[in-house]
Image (tube, grey):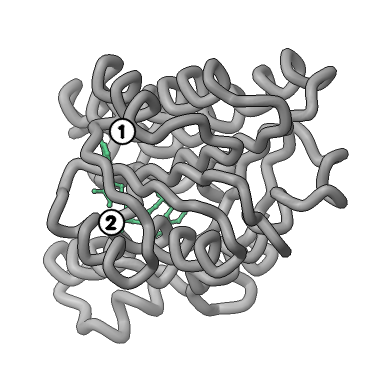
Amino acid sequence: MNLAGKRALITGGGSGIGADLARGFAEAGAEVVIAGRRMDALEAVARKTGARAVQADVTDEQSVTRLFLEAGPCEIVIANAGAAESAPFARTSLAQWHAMLGANLTGTFLTFREGLKQMPGWGRLIAIASIAGLRGYPYVAPYVAAKHGVVGLTRAVAQEIAKREITVNAICPGYVATEMTERSVANIRARTGLDEAEALAALTKTSPQNRLIAPAEITSLALWLCSQEARGMNGQALPLAGGEA
Ligand code: NAD
């Protein structure tokens, strides 16, 4: 994979999957721009990977517009920023609903729209959705709804850009070994009194492979989507979840 001469913009690049995407795309020769709200986290990843850090909130239209102006034309745009909160559905507040739709769905909408506007000729739009974009899970209804929305958005945009040298796809991972999953484990422990191994097992057992996905597995699929050989892959929601869906 040689992405020399291509610029890749990754939202939520200060941690977890986004930080690994920055590593992988930089190693493949791309010029990497990472965006997020926390400059300290972004700068730590920037130091390790050589990426350029730009502060942006993906839920804020002006902020996303500014981000692409600062970044310069990007051939590869990865809408990775997202957030997950859990609550029983009947106790889910409207604020939680808006927060999940904002970070996961509106964030992807704004990133894709502004990303597409400035895309030179050839391009790749990639959303890091979730296996929760393809099937339901308990206690995370707004997250599941938002990620299904990301998959729908991907399918719709794919139809519009199909005649161009651009593709748009969504990667749908199961539980990944990142801070987000660590927070889910901590929540389960707080709610149930399970110890760390038991709480983690409650998550990994949702996968037929009974394990967490490594961020590098997602990076490797994202890199492949950027190859010429993947140009026929458009509008797809690709599960990366050990057979969970
Ligand atoms: P993470 O919490 O480490 O990363 C999410 C990043 O997005 C953070 O850096 C966060 O600061 C950033 N972010 C959140 N809201 C933002 C906003 N409004 N503007 C800018 N940045 C914002 O978790 P992760 O696991 O690396 O998650 C990355 C993506 O992968 C998310 O979209 C998540 O939903 C998805 N995902 C994660 C898992 C998992 O198990 N961890 C599974 C499937 C999908």
Beta carbon at label 2 within 8 Å of ligand 1: yes
Beta carbon at label 1 within 8 Å of ligand 1: yes
Mark 1 residue type: Ala
Vertical comparison of 41 with 147: above or below = below
Judge left or right: residue 156 versus residue 71. Answer: right
Residue bearing mark 1? 103
- Closer to the chain start, of discs 2 and 1, is 2
Task: Give whichever of 70, 172 is nearer the camera.
Answer: 70
- Classify mark 2: helix, strand or loop: loop
Q: Which residue is drawn at 30% across and 16% down?
A: 61
Judge left or right: residue 3 versus residue 198. Answer: right
Task: Give whichever of 46, 198 is nearer the camera.
Answer: 46
Q: Residue at x 29, y 22 (%)?
A: 66
Task: Give whichever of 172, 223 is nearer the camera.
Answer: 223
Q: Residue 101: where, in percent of width, then height?
A: 34, 26
Residue bearing mark 2? 14
Identify the residue at the far front of this view.
5
